Image (cartoon, helix red, strand yellow):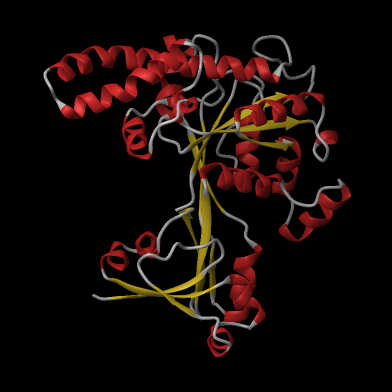
Amino acid sequence: MGFKLGIVGLPNVGKSTLFNAVTESAAAEAANYPFCTIEPNVGEVGVPDPRLDALAAIAGSAQIIPTRLTFVDIAGLVRGASKGEGLGNQFLAHIREVDAIGMVLRCFEDDDITHVEGRIDPLADSETIQTELMLADLDSLERRVVQTEKRAKTGDKEMKALLAVMTPLLAALREGKPARSVAFADEDIAIRDSLNLLTAKPVLYIANVDEGSAGSGNAFSEKVVAHAKSEGAASVVISARIEAELAQLPREERASFLADLGLEEAGLSRLIRAGYALLGLVTYFTVGPKEARAWTIHKGTRAPQAAGVIHSDFEKGFIRSETIAYNDYVALKGEAGARDAGKLRLEGKEYVVQDGDVLHFRFAT
């Protein structure tokens, strides 16, 4: 399943350059003028995972199928977007469809690339974006709360529950705090999510630095990382220009290119890991002679629901899962070795799938 990350930011911060690079496509035109991206460009990438390659090599799998991550490059936002300025309405509509917001912040100086507000200040850019999203959420809730209050007064239990969630959200937004800052009991989170608020979505701060700062960051990116940490959000430092250069190279030359720059891995890998951690996602594997495949689930998912990611019939008819931990599968050279060593476990409906598990589901048809 992977996840869908909306790439957002002010114009000319490197959004489309980053999108092009990580999706290894030219789907998003990158140019030095605002609103270059009008319709959202969508690109899918396979999630790099060395574990999948190792499993496939042991099993002799004919095909390797990674899990997928969807990037959505959304039109640049400007001050006043919540009131329809620039391409605000399109921006706000498209961002509602993603799982998380990847907020690209400009952390580089370049006189040849203009900034829409005439200065380089990533935290001010972040505040502009957050403010517009909060204003849009505030407008949405204030329009809905009046009708909800009327229906709640009639004794409608569903509306009472909805109002109990809307009230603290409204208070937070009026104080200039995002919806995700409000804590709810587990039973109320689904109600909050039904409101589809922009600021309820988790944020991954992406500090786009110059090429020379890709390894260690710079003064701008340090501020972004500290800000993300203060919010309990995720952050990653990346150079869109380096990623763009990397995308143009043959795959066999990429490792040496990164090594020459003092980088251990591509920014895409760090971006994906940060996104997985932010959303609480883990990966399990199915392995056989035909294919080795990665599947993404939320941390804490039980075996039947994990099986349902493959096919709903697997969940409905779930009997048990034959389970081998990744390290055991590799150390014992596959399923037969793990079985002989007593490392293949039969797990039932209450089993919580762990990151790296190699699973084979048994189900009734």
At a point 69% along the width and 20% down the height, the residue shown is 122
Give left or right: position of 103 versus 38: right
Q: Position of residue 202 (x, y in %)?
A: 51, 34
**Which residue is nearer to you in this view: 151 or 82?**
151
Depth check: 101 or 229 in front? 229
Which residue corresponds to the image point at 51% horizontal and 13% vertical from the top-left?
176
Q: What's the residue at 27%, 15% (across, down)?
A: 145
- Please state the total of marks drawn on the protein image: 0
Q: Say which of 87 and 157 sits in front.
A: 157
The answer to whether residue 123 shows anywhere in this view is: yes
Residue 63, horizontal then vertical, whole percent = 53, 72
Q: Is residue 331 above or below residue 267?
A: below
Q: Is residue 269 above or below residue 59?
A: above
Horizontal relation, residue 16 to residue 144: left or right: right
| Quadrant of residue 158 within the rendered picture | top left
Q: Residue at x 27, y 16 (%)?
A: 144
357 relative to 95, above or below: below
